[in-house]
Amino acid sequence: MRRIFGRHQVQSTTSSTSPTTESDITVHFPPENDVQVSVFSQVFARLESRFNHFRTITHDPNARVAAIYAIDKETGEQLKAVDAAKLPIHSRLTRRNALTPISLLPPEILARVFHFLVFEDPACSREKNLGWIRATHVCQFWHQVALDDSSLWAKISGVSENTKLISEMLARARNAPLVIDIYLRGESGLETLRMFPPHLSHTRELRLHGPSIHNSDGVRGICGREAPALEHFELRALVKSSITSRDLGGTTLFKGRAPRLRTFSLFQILVPWSLIPHGQLTHLNIVLIKEVFTTNIPLCGDLNQLIDLLVNCPGLEILALERCLPSQLAQFPHGQTIHLPRLSRFCLVGSGSCITNLMKMLKLPSSTRLHLHFTSENTSAHNVHPLLPIVSAQLQGPASVEFKNLSLTFGCMYHPLKMTASTSVPASRIHQFQGFEDDTDDNDEFVLSFDEIRELGPRIDLLEGVCKVLPISNLEFLSICAFRSLNWVELFKRCTKLTTLQLIGHRTSSLVRALTTPKVTDTRRGWNWKKRRDSRDRTPGQLASDTAVHAQPPIFPKLKFLSLNGLDFSEKEDLSGILFDVVEKGLRQRKASRKTPLRMLRIDDCAISTRRANALQKLVKEFHWDGKDVFNEYEDADDHDLEMDPLSDSD
């Protein structure tokens, strides 16, 4: 059998055919540490002797109890002797570790290394996960260096199930500024929340995810204390379990004592505007999943409190109010002017009338990024039109804005009308379309979207109005995803500097056809019969004037990159013909002109045959095709000569 004392193993060998006796026991020790080996040998021999002795005693219960007590007493005494014998070994190992290169580093350098490890592998990130703390188990020196630096223990993040670890880290952090980011789960959530109030005085960042009405007592205990060092506060409740001001307690958060608070975020938390700390805020985010209009919740009822909050926070840089605008804004014609000179990003989600009336009250820098999302309301879409002059004035401030990138989604009535614009061209010339519900890029300077406007007329009016308002004359990148036909040429005819065009959906084919110069025709009666005779009587200038009336130049003369997605190249239009013929003709025209050749063509998810794709490939320098050979029953390739000279004049 084998027993372990400290780091030394004691092995006894016995015969497999005879019972074990004291004389059969052979003890083996490592050759080093003779003194410690002698002590362990004596202790083990005495314990084995006692064990064999008491094993032979009678089965009398009293005798057995007395024997157990005697063994426990003597074992305790002998273990103390073993611990005393281990001290010289530990001392020797400590001296040995002190000579290794890593132990020669100054404690400050080693602590700095630990800080990088904290960033890479934080503790508490998962249940029963020590993370970086495992490094403190390497040796006594590392353990002591970590204990001496309280800031290593000040970053507490992860899940609430690690209650023992969180408690120990709070103790070891001592008075260091705390950064807490915890996901509250189950019954451990309330236990974890109750640990934080005593440490709120030196908490710099506090982010709590998932609190519900079941652990609102813990949230109330935190919000009811002063927070003199708190700079960032975020409270994200469960979607199905909102927290109200009654759950937070009191009439002010942190007893009105949070002088350093800069960032304040509430997600699915219903509180009065007056409860939010005023003064030094730079980031304010109030987000609700759906709008709530009720007199029991002051958040949606008191417009004066919202105005007072914004007036007293002139240093705001980011402001997001989603589905939380007071209902009074719907009938509020115009009010006090609110100056927010440092605002860089402004996000509003709500009804059209509320957003419009709030925008009338605000005075913002022209560089402010506007993200406006109009939700449904019991009014017609024409109520949004008063916003367009406000947006126009906003973009045409002292520092005028010129957009270079525009993305438009114009789907069916069940999808939002969405438009995003920015002053920078994307790094990738061609985006990969993912669907209608793509997340908006935070770098977009302007985002405008409308929900629940199902009538086609108002949707078209809104789109036309916005395109007229936006400064898009210098546009270089344009992406359109549409499943409704519109007069795209009229909307974007002034974008003469466009170099990249991405069209998604078969309803954009009208814009594809406009990329080709139409044939020059003359409708004068008898022109074909008297062509040669009339040309003798008219000057060259008169002839050019006649033909110019009927010739329309192609749209986007500087186009270099073209991406087509979801189009049917067999689609036929009475005036211009089959789409493939029009595209092929346009590519030939642009290739023949050295000033406007198309550099790249990309085709994805389109109804096109391999033969036709190969024909288009010959007309561009770069060609990308997903290889999907789709044969359309209306496609008749024999009617088209696909092998003609690409530079020939077939018009």
Image: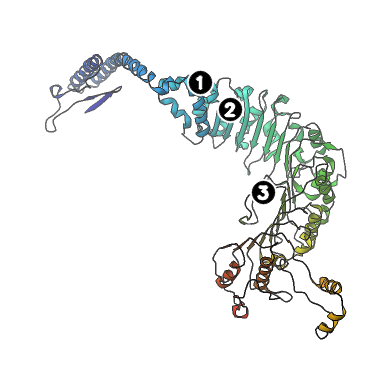
What amino acid is at disc 3?
Answer: Thr
- x, y percent for residue 2: 23, 27
Give the alpha-carbon distance from disc 3 to disc 2, as whole Å: 38 Å
Q: Which residue is mark 1?
A: 108
Q: Secondary structure at mark 3?
A: loop
Query: Residue 19 lies in what quarter of the image?
Result: top left
Choose between 457 and 414: the one closer to the eye. Answer: 457
Q: Earlier in the sequence, mark 2 or mark 1?
A: 1
- x, y percent for residue 508: 70, 65
Number of numbered discs visible in the structure rendering: 3
What amino acid is at disc 2?
Answer: Arg
Note whether 287 is above or below 561 in the view shown: above
Give the alpha-carbon distance from disc 2 to disc 1, as whole Å: 34 Å
Note whether 258 is above or below 86 in the view shown: below
Q: Which residue is mark 3?
A: 440
Q: Nearer the viewer, mark 3 or mark 2?
A: 3
Q: Which residue is mark 2?
A: 194
In this rendering, position of residue 378 left or right of residue 144? right
Quarter in which the C terminus is drawn:
bottom right
Q: Earlier in the sequence, mark 1 or mark 3?
A: 1
- x, y percent for residue 551: 79, 71
Q: Residues within 10 Å of mark 2 (few under 14, many from 20)?
A: some
Give the alpha-carbon distance from disc 1 to disc 3, as whole Å: 44 Å
Q: Nearer the viewer, mark 1 or mark 3?
A: 1
Q: Secondary structure at mark 1?
A: helix
Query: Residue 215 lies in what quarter of the image?
Result: top right
Q: Secondary structure at mark 2?
A: loop
Q: Earlier in the sequence, mark 3 or mark 2?
A: 2
What amino acid is at disc 1?
Answer: Glu
